Image: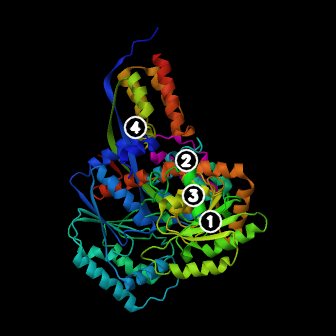
Amino acid sequence: MAKIEDYAQIIGQSSIDDLRHIADRLKGKSVQQINSTAVGGGVAEILNRMIPLMRELGVNTKWDVIKGGEQFFAVTKKFHNALHGNKEDLSDKDFEIFLETGNKNASEMEIFGDIVFVHDPQPITLIEKRSGNKWAWRCHVDVSKPDEKVWKFLENYISKYDSAVFSSPVFSHKLSIRQFLISPSIDPLSDKNIELPQETIDQTLKKYKVPDDKPIVTQISRFDRLKDPVGVIEAYKIVKRHIDCSLVLAGGTAADDPEGQLVLEEVREKAGNDPDIHILLMPQNDIEVNALQRASTVIVQKSIKEGFGLTVSEALWKSKPVVASNVGGIPHQIKHKFSGLLCNSVEGAAFSIKQLLNAPSYAKKLGENGKEHIKNNFLITRQIKDYLLLFLSMYYGEDIVYL
Amino acid sequence: MRKDIIKAKEPFRFSTRLHLSELTGLKAKNLREFLRLLKTVKGSCIYYHTHRYLQQHQYLSPEPPNDFAYWVTKSLNEDELGEMLASIDTVQFSTIRQLREKIISTISGFMKAHPTSRKKFADEGDEFHFIKAISFVIPTNHIANDLKEFADILEKITIDSIYFHVFEARLRLEKGYNDFSNWIEKSVGDIELAKSISKLDPYTFTLDDLRRTMIMMIRKRIK
């Protein structure tokens, strides 16, 4: 795993020195981070990388994962969809299950952090264990138009925290506590983003039987309705009328997502017998995801809702031209026609994919600009800096803090 | 012949400024609400929205479009007002209060001249969200005792540090002068160089171009 000094080659030694300066100011404080899954999904992925780097900087931080059964995760999946604004059939029993698991975790988990940093709704009720320490709640979900019932339920807990953190200003709500804007990030030195030899890329294509004799359009995402894989196939079919290309839909399912299998079946049905559509249900294999992204001519992220959409940052970091929905955190990563193309419909996605396939020099320029934007704003070192400042902010109230 | 390097009376210690964005929960969907909030939000909001582009998109263009100009153009389709706001010459203001007043007078003047502008609304989800900058100022280990050391350090410090000494010190901390010029004049005694650096309009450079330009000016001076 990369060491903090390894990032100096990308962001410069002085930026690493800055991180050390801030980390020094947190000496003597322990930071406990809590979420609901150790593998799968963007949150676990970033914590897996971030915790060791924070420790290397001298921050005393530990990561704990709550426990939950099948029923609990079925309910939290409903919460997740409802927070995205979908109509979900949530019964009193569902809320009971949520609270029961919350209570069980509260009684079993030791809370020791001077600062407790809770990620997403699943562990939110742990705040009831608050005892004089500082608590922050990190929302990774697009809650711009949440189902009122679920939001109100969660708000009772959110208001007991010291601070809340959102990925986009449009996700913020009127709250009685301080709210911060912190974008998520990617790790340029992780297996998913590191430079790969051509040989690895070729081997991956061979393994998944994806020929490279025609342009490859790819969406890497969990098989989840909110990622609209069916919409991607529809867009591909429009493109295919004019340009011979293949489509790769690749992803796995997260441990806390019981719907994945169902969506995968819908996708397979939609793809029919088209030999140029490659649906790859992949186990967690970051090198292979990296290789597929690097092998792609155009990368698509046609989400209907998106907390942030880290796959867009991953693609841009590889200087790939990207077509992505104008939702959630995606417009923060893509300035339309400058660092990628934004779309609002299947037809719009298809039109943009066609444009990029037909104009490689334009596509190249968008990809290059995209990489620069990610380097400046969406790398893990920037997020570590923001989190350390967030922790410090819990001890200061001023707008200008001299450390 | 190489000039002797003058040792400064006081060394220059570089600081850096790191910022955290705090959401205020305040949003505007039309010019009337926008103007009302512009009058009452904290100065750190005005600062954030007029300077964010410098750091987040510093590689893109030397002209930093401010968030206010961007929103009225993109979300309210008021291109003329957008252009007027984007053209505000930030460098001529030495306090956030003055800059705020200029923004307010530009918008209210436009609303008077174009009464129909009051009837335009941003789409749902496209409202203007006011954000404020929380700045953390941290001293670095870089200390310059003369102009040569100063230029050498300028080469390697972060753009955050340059940003702090040039933009934040001058406007947000209301020093009216950038820290570099101040030190070069008071401690090194080179008034001419201090003035030439002070005369630069930093808003029309990318941060890296600004760094290069200042290094070039200093090196030329001590050659």
Residue sticking out furthest to the right: A242
Q: Is residue B32 above or below residue B86?
A: below
The kind of residue on which mark 4 rests is Lys
Q: Choose the circle earlier in sequence order: 3 or 1.
A: 3
Q: Is residue A369 above or below residue A349?
A: above
Q: Nearer the viewer, residue B216 or B48?
A: B216
SS assignment at label 3? helix
The kind of residue on which mark 3 rests is Gln
| Disc ID at residue B175 | 4
| Chain of residue at mark 2 | A
Give the alpha-carbon distance from disc 4 to disc 3, as whole Å. Answer: 60 Å
| Disc ID at residue A203 | 3
- Measuring from the top left, give residue A235's x and y in whole percent: 69, 70
Same chain for labels 4 and 3? Say yes or no.
Answer: no
Q: Are marks 4 and 1 in contact (CB under 8 Å)?
A: no
Give the alpha-carbon distance from disc 3 to disc 1, as whole Å. Answer: 10 Å
Q: Is residue B176 above or below residue A371?
A: above
Same chain for labels 4 and 2? Say yes or no.
Answer: no
| Chain of residue at mark 4 | B
Q: Residues within 10 Å of mark 3 (few under 14, many from 20)?
A: few
Q: Range of the magenta residues?
A: B85-110
Q: Is residue A80 magenta?
A: no
Instruction: Name the mark nearer the viewer: 4 or 3.
Output: 3
The kind of residue on which mark 1 rests is Lys
Q: Residues within 10 Å of mark 1 (few under 14, many from 20)?
A: few
SS assignment at label 4? loop
